[in-house]
Image (tube, rainbow, N blue to C red):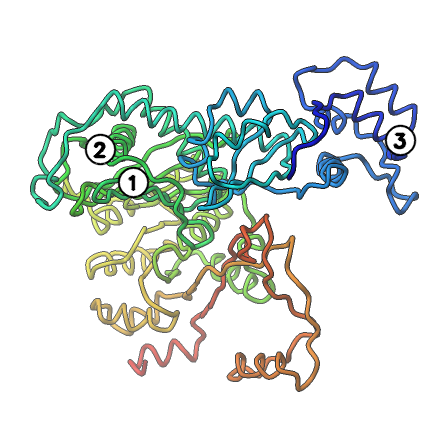
Amino acid sequence: MSAQKYSIVIDLRWCLDELLADKVIDQRGYNLVMTSRRDKAQHPLLTISEFGLPNGHALDKNVEHKLTLVWLNQWLAAKAGMALVRIDPLKVDVPAVTQLMSFEYARSQHILPIEVTNDEVVIGTDQPFCTEWQTSIEKLIKSKSYRTVYINPEQINRYRQEFYQVTQAIAGANSVHKRAAADVTNVEALLQLGDNTNPDANDQHIVRVVDWLLQYAFEQRASDIHLEPRRETGKVRFRIDGVLHTVYEMPLAIIVAVTARIKILGRLNVAEKRKPQDGRLKTRTPKGLETELRLSTMPTAFGEKLVMRVFDPEVLVRSFAQLGLSGKQLDTWHELTAHPNGIILVTGPTGSGKTTTLYSTLKQLATEQVNVCTIEDPIEMIEPAFNQMQVNPGVDLHFADGIRSLMRQDPDIIMVGEIRDAETANMAVQASLTGHLVLSTLHTNDAPSSLTRLHDLGIQPFLTSATILGVMAQRLLRTLCPHCKKALYVIPDSEIAVQWQELVQPWRAPAPAQIYTAQGCEHCRHTGYQGRVGLYEIMPLSNELKKLVAADAI
């Protein structure tokens, strides 16, 4: 964008004058906003959007259209002739953009660099007619060209603060704790205990980095947080909707200190880096909800790797329909869980939502008249309605021992975290035969394979047929972004119709009249997908199937 002949910082009066001239608001709305008490430091569009004034450009006058911040941003961007851009923090190279200019300069000029390439810098602003900075920007970006875009004032204020704060925290920690160069080719040297050259995990810079990292992960809907040491740097990655995204690269000393800080919070042995450890910690999301994080460490060639599994606190209040169960499948699942005794298995790979399904089911079954007990490794989410026990191999408390103990606790429903050995399988069978409903997980690829897996663990076929009520296998599928998905009409004998028939050939399901395809937009980071939903295969054991199982015909 070329330099303007004039430079102004738009204020509330300017915005109202322009909105009135464009017949977006009337004189009554103008006077209402101008005569009301307001925060003068707040961006004028934020102030105007709080009043909910009618939008004079609404096409349908019978429907009350309000002036929202989204519409006002579009209006101002169009008036300035700029593109309206939504910041995707996962795609911003934070160290690169914060090195271009100081925080004070960016704030005073109402700008924020959001993208740096070899030959161009993209600069965002919420003051599109303020052009004073354009005369000095060439000195900052040197030989690069620049392009100016308009950004929502809420976003630019928030991310300007966050980007510079985390950069300052990492730089501060790095300058205070200059780590001696390590011989990274010597794996044993990386695994020494008590390395006192590491930055202090309780340093305030490190505390701020950890706080930012966790809050950032919650806001981005991350299911897993990976802290990975490399030869010279450390990498932070988030798994969002099943796909890993690199979020930040920081000095190796800082990633080590961040890992140590999180280990302290999770009550892990900070000095022990030679073997894997598991733990958990509890914190709050930006919405104020308590959430659990499961920690897992692993020694690698360049240091200790840490993965945190984030458990959504809203899982326990979701309905089965929100999880993807509906229609006949939902009815079948309700019928299975209504039995007073027997075994119900949920199968699938790691991260397929088995824990979510079990917790949601138990939450709906846990009434005042029912005693629900669990044995888990580890306890992944604390729920007051359950009596939860954690496996502890250090005191010889395993799954089988836990089931044996729970059977003397007058339980109605027992949830076993995982059936992984013959003894646990036998105890689960015994619990179901003595009048308890047992829910557990098993690692198989599909529902029918769980029966052969139990036989491999030594369970007799007649016991399997007598105790197993049903098996649910599940996967998680990414859902199309609701903001950009595109509808396609399925014409008979068209390419789409042929592809559908090939896809569902074994079941011969008729093609729908309309389907949707992924497109990509700013809301979904141009992937076309946002969120995930469960895909289920439920196999209740009918009388015919039980006869086959008992006869060892499967």
Helix, strand or loop under label 3: helix
Q: From this view, report whether residue 504 is shown above or below residue 383.
A: below
Q: Name the N-terminal-most of marks 3 and 1.
A: 3
Q: Is residue 466 left or right of residue 326?
A: left
Viewer-proximal residue, 23 or 52?
A: 23
Q: Are marks 1 and 2 in contact (CB under 8 Å)?
A: yes
Viewer-proximal residue, 28 or 22?
A: 22
Q: How many marks?
A: 3
Q: Residues within 10 Å of mark 2 (few under 14, many from 20)?
A: some
- Residue 438 seen in the figure: no
Label drawn at residue 295: 1
Q: Residues within 10 Å of mark 1 (few under 14, many from 20)?
A: many
Q: Quadrant of the C terminus?
A: bottom left
Label drawn at residue 268: 2
Tell me the CA gap for discs 3 and 1. 58 Å
Label drawn at residue 21: 3
Q: Quadrant of residue 424?
A: bottom left
Q: Residue at x 60, y 84 (%)?
A: 498
Viewer-proximal residue, 528 or 444?
A: 528
Helix, strand or loop under label 1: strand
Q: Are marks 2 and 3 in contact (CB under 8 Å)?
A: no
Type of amino acid at the residue the image marks with label 2: Leu
Tell me the CA gap for discs 2 and 3. 64 Å
Viewer-proximal residue, 375 or 140?
A: 140
Q: Name the N-terminal-most of marks 2 and 3.
A: 3
